[in-house]
Image (cartoon, helix red, strand yellow):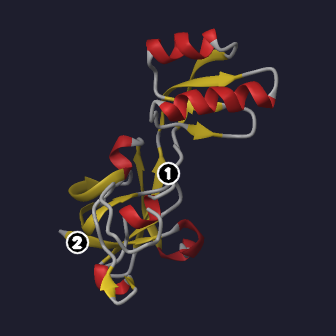
Amino acid sequence: MQRAVLIVRKLAVKPDKVVDTITLDHQDRHRRRVAMTADGGLEFLLDLGNAAILEDGDALKLEDGALVQVAAKPEDLIEITTENPLRLMKVAWHLGNRHVPAEVTTDAIYIAPDHVLVEMVRGLGAKADPVKRPFRPERGAYHEHAAHDHSPLEHKQGGHDHHHEHGEACGCGHGH
């Protein structure tokens, strides 16, 4: 079975190298090591050094150089809209205060279905409607330091190895 050990980010994907596509929901796009079967039947082992988030449009590079493109699977979500941007920002603040994974667009916020949150946002004067679409939640502000797609040796800062687990302070003075 071929292995995929590298993520090629969306902007660097060469379409002529893509041999298959794998469609994954939000939960399944956060992976490190798992056997996978692409939509066209290609079987491979995802074998990354660290857990990483696979974004819609990224690709997994197989040992032979071929790519398997990642597609975000449509899933059941709640679309939150308001009549003005200020109210939507206030709803976003309340959701963020609860550490809810959310996708923020110009006109709406998308969250996983949760009746308590639906009641809350409606209480804040927003509409909350069920929809089916790919879920692409925002990454946390400290995400770039939390989930690297490369080895720790490739990311040195201040003369020390700058690799650490999500939420763990490293004391390097970079404010995270």
Reading the image, the residue beneath label 1 is 139
- Mark 2, Cα crowd under 10 Å, few <14 / some 14-19 / many 20+, is some
Observer able to see residue 41 = no
Question: In the structure shown, which secondary structural element does the residue marked by tag 2 occupy?
Answer: strand
Left/right placement of residue 45 relative to residue 42 reads: left
- At a point 74% along the width and 21% down the height, the residue shown is 82
Q: Residue at x 33, y 46 (%)?
A: 28
Residue 118 vs residue 27, the one in the foreground: 118
* Residue 59 visible to the viewer: yes
Where residue 176 appears, as percent x and y from the top left, is 44, 62
- SS of the residue at dot 1? loop
Which amino acid type corresponds to the residue marked 2 in the rendered image?
Answer: Gln
Q: Earlier in the sequence, mark 2 or mark 1?
A: 2
Q: Is residue 172 above or below residue 52?
A: below
x, y (%) of residue 86?
Answer: 78, 29
Say left or right for 123 vs 157.
right
Residue at figure coordinates x 64%, y 23% from the top left:
80
Residue ID for mark 2: 2
Name which residue lies at 70% across and 23% down: 81
- How far from the left and from the top, in percent, is residue 6? 35, 74
Question: Which residue in the rendered view is the most extreme toward the bottom?
Answer: 159
Quarter of the image for the N terminus: give it: bottom left
Spatial CA span between label 2 and label 1: 30 Å
Image height of 90 relative to 176, above or below? above
Could you classify mark 1 by the number of other residues whose Cα lies within 10 Å: few (under 14), some (14-19), or many (20 or more)?
Answer: few
Query: Amino acid under label 1?
Result: Arg
Residue 125 lies in quadrant? top right
Q: How many marks?
A: 2
